[in-house]
Image (tube, rainbow, N blue to C red):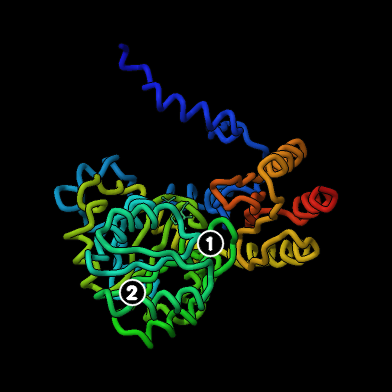
């Protein structure tokens, strides 16, 4: 049999997806008006990053990093970047990973141990869940943003485990709402050996002074065990960093398999990350973004089906996969790019179209969008 033939049972899985209208496909042509990408600040689309990177002297000669950080891929550049990032995020240390997915898998697979417990929000990102599953810890989910549900799990299980790790996102990628971080930090104060791990993927560049994120905006940076910042969203480039104590960095270098067994990011990626941090300080893109979020929010509050959100992500629930797809198509015909998010990616009954707001969206684009939404 040809090695290029997929086994029967895998073909069947694909067919089943297709029959349910859920087959994922890669699209090349997308409508031009962007309510879809994660480039919230426009660092990529508006050319800020390419311009900033072009001005770096001297141009990098080598293209790859040549190995993992522990073999040949380490450099003054990457260690210097980590020092800069740690300072910016008011943390003792920082460790760069190749992506947000890698950072979460690398962190959650090696920190919780066999006799520990991980409590995670039911809407947690797949990368965190995958990391948790790779660990040997017990894990339970709590209801989305529900403090009573979290508190109940802690009270019931605390005495049976050595440590409890709480996994949340500061901004949830599908709903756009924010976690009750202050209340969670208070909970950790009451319960010994309970630690917070916060994924700030969608908060970096959006919340806090110079876009430092939601933990910074709430002044709780020092109360979080580990924070994850990803660079593929508002920063417009690629990669991620985990910030926390010096001992945490040291532990990850020794035990995080996603860090140890992967070629390090190349110099030009580190350049881009550093340029993005500079742009956070030197441009007013965060202000432009916030103005658009406020404008969008006012319009969205007139439509009951929107999940209330102060972030760049706004979701309009339409309640089934066909309707969500229909709306995506109507928008596309009007040159607007927004994505239908279908079940089982989201819970049945909460199928939606998700809108991402950017610094570069114009008032006219937002008005045109709502003209269509109001009659859907
Ligand atoms: C909350 C969250 N964490 C982590 C990731 C993964 O980040 P990256 O795209 O850098 O792998 C994503 C991206 O989808 C995300 O939404």
From the image, which quarter does the N terminus lie in? top left
Residue 255: x and y in percent read 19, 59
Q: Nearer the viewer, residue 348 or 66?
A: 348
Q: Quadrant of residue 152?
A: bottom left
Q: Quadrant of residue 195?
A: bottom left
The residue depicted at 51 percent of the width and 65 percent of the height is 203
Q: Quadrant of residue 285?
A: bottom right
Where disc 1 sits, the SS reads: loop
Crowd band around label 1 with a 10 angstrom C-alpha radius: few (<14), some (14–19), many (20+): many
Question: Can residue 282 be seen here?
Answer: no
Disc 1 designates what residue?
Answer: 172
Name, please, the residue furthest toward the top: 1
Residue 348: x and y in percent read 61, 50
Q: Nearer the viewer, residue 149 or 26?
A: 149
Horizontally, residue 310 falls left or right of residue 127, namely right
- Give above or below for 64 relative to 215: above
- Give above or below for 320 relative to 221: above
Residue 234: x and y in percent read 52, 57
Crowd band around label 2 with a 10 angstrom C-alpha radius: few (<14), some (14–19), many (20+): some
The residue depicted at 83 percent of the width and 51 percent of the height is 371
Q: Are marks 2 and 1 in contact (CB under 8 Å)?
A: no
Name, please, the residue furthest toward the left: 71
Disc 2 designates what residue?
Answer: 225
Q: Earlier in the sequence, mark 2 or mark 1?
A: 1
Q: Nearer the viewer, residue 268 or 4?
A: 4
Is label 1 within 8 A of ligand 1 (CB to nearest ligand atom)?
Answer: yes
């Amino acid at each position: 049999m040809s090695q290029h033939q997929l086994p029967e049972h895998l073909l069947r899985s694909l067919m089943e997806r297709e029959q349910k209208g859920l087959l994922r496909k890669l699209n090349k042509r997308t409508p031009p008006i962007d309510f879809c990408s994660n480039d919230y600040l426009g660092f990529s689309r508006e050319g800020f990053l390419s311009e900033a990177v072009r001005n770096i002297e001297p141009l990098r000669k080598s293209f790859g990093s040549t190995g993992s950080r522990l073999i040949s891929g380490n450099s003054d550049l990457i260690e210097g970047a980590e020092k800069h990032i740690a300072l910016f995020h008011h943390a003792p240390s920082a460790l760069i990973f190749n992506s947000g997915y890698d950072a979460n898998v690398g962190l959650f697979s090696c920190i919780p141990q066999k006799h520990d417990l991980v409590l995670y929000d039911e809407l947690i990102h797949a990368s965190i869940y995958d990391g948790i599953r790779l660990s040997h810890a017990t894990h339970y989910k709590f209801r989305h943003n529900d403090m009573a549900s979290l508190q109940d799990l802690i009270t019931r299980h605390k005495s049976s485990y050595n440590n409890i790790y709480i996994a949340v996102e500061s901004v949830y990628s599908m709903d756009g709402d924010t976690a009750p971080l202050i209340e969670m930090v208070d909970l950790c104060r009451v319960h010994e050996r309970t630690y917070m791990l916060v994924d700030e993927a969608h908060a970096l560049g959006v919340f806090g002074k110079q876009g430092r994120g939601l933990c910074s905006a709430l002044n709780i940076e020092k109360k979080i065990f580990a924070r994850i910042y990803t660079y593929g969203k508002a920063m417009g480039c690629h990669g991620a960093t985990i910030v926390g104590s010096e001992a945490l960095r040291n532990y990850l270098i020794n035990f995080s398999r996603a860090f140890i067994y992967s070629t390090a990011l190349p110099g030009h990626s580190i350049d881009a990350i550093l340029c993005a941090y500079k742009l956070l300080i030197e441009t007013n893109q965060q202000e432009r973004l916030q103005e658009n979020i406020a404008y969008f929010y006012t319009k969205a509050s007139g439509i009951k089906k929107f999940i209330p959100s102060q972030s760049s992500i706004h979701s309009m629930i339409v309640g089934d996969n066909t309707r969500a797809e229909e709306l995506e198509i109507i928008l596309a015909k009007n040159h607007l790019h927004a994505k239908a998010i279908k079940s089982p990616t989201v819970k049945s009954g909460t199928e939606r179209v998700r809108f991402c707001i950017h610094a570069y969206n114009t008032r006219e684009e937002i008005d045109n969008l709502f003209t269509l939404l109001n009659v859907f």
